[in-house]
Image (cartoon, rainbow, N blue to C red):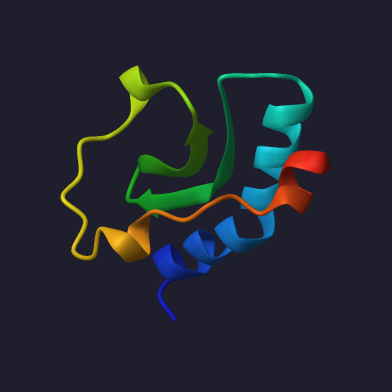
C-alpha cells in the first residue's frame, strides 16, 4: 500500500471521533491531521475535516449521488 493510502486509512479511526466532538461542542466543523507526506523538502499534510457549514462544502460531482448521501448514525450524535 502506498504511503498516501496508509495515511488516508487513518480517517477510518478518526471520523466518528471528529463527529462526536463536533456535536458535543456544537462546533460547525472539526479537523485532524492524518499525517505528512514528504516530497523532497516539501511537506504535504493529509487532513480529514468534517463540516456542517455549507459555505465550506467542496463542490463535488459524486459518481453515485445516493451512495454519497447517508443519514448519520444516531450513536455518533449521542456520543
62 up-or-down from 58: above or below: below
47 up-or-down from 11: above or below: above
Q: Quadrant of residue 43?
A: top left
* Quadrant assignment for the C terminus: top right
**Residue 23 coordinates in the image, percent (x, y):** 71, 29
The mark total stands at: 0
Q: Quadrant of residue 66?
A: bottom left
47 up-or-down from 57: above or below: below
* Quadrant assignment for the N terminus: bottom left
Q: Nearer the viewer, residue 48 or 64?
A: 64
Q: Residue at x 79, y 27 (%)?
A: 24
Q: Is residue 66 left or right of residue 61?
A: right
**Residue 63 coordinates in the image, percent (x, y):** 18, 64
Q: Residue at x 68, y 60 (%)?
A: 13
Q: Residue at x 50, y 37 (%)?
A: 49
Q: Is residue 76 left or right of residue 6?
A: right
* Furthest-right residue in this view: 79
Q: Nearer the viewer, residue 54 or 15?
A: 54
Q: Residue at x 53, y 52 (%)?
A: 71
**Residue 36 coordinates in the image, percent (x, y):** 49, 48
* Furthest-bottom residue in this view: 1
Amino acid at each position: 500500500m502506498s504511503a498516501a493510502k496508509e495515511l488516508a486509512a487513518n480517517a477510518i479511526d478518526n471520523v466518528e471521533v471528529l463527529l462526536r466532538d463536533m456535536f458535543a461542542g456544537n462546533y460547525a466543523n472539526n479537523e485532524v491531521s492524518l499525517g505528512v507526506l514528504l516530497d523532497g523538502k516539501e511537506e504535504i499534510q493529509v487532513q480529514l475535516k468534517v463540516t456542517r457549514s455549507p459555505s465550506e462544502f467542496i463542490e463535488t460531482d459524486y459518481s453515485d449521488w445516493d451512495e454519497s448521501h447517508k443519514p448519520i448514525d444516531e450513536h455518533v450524535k449521542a456520543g
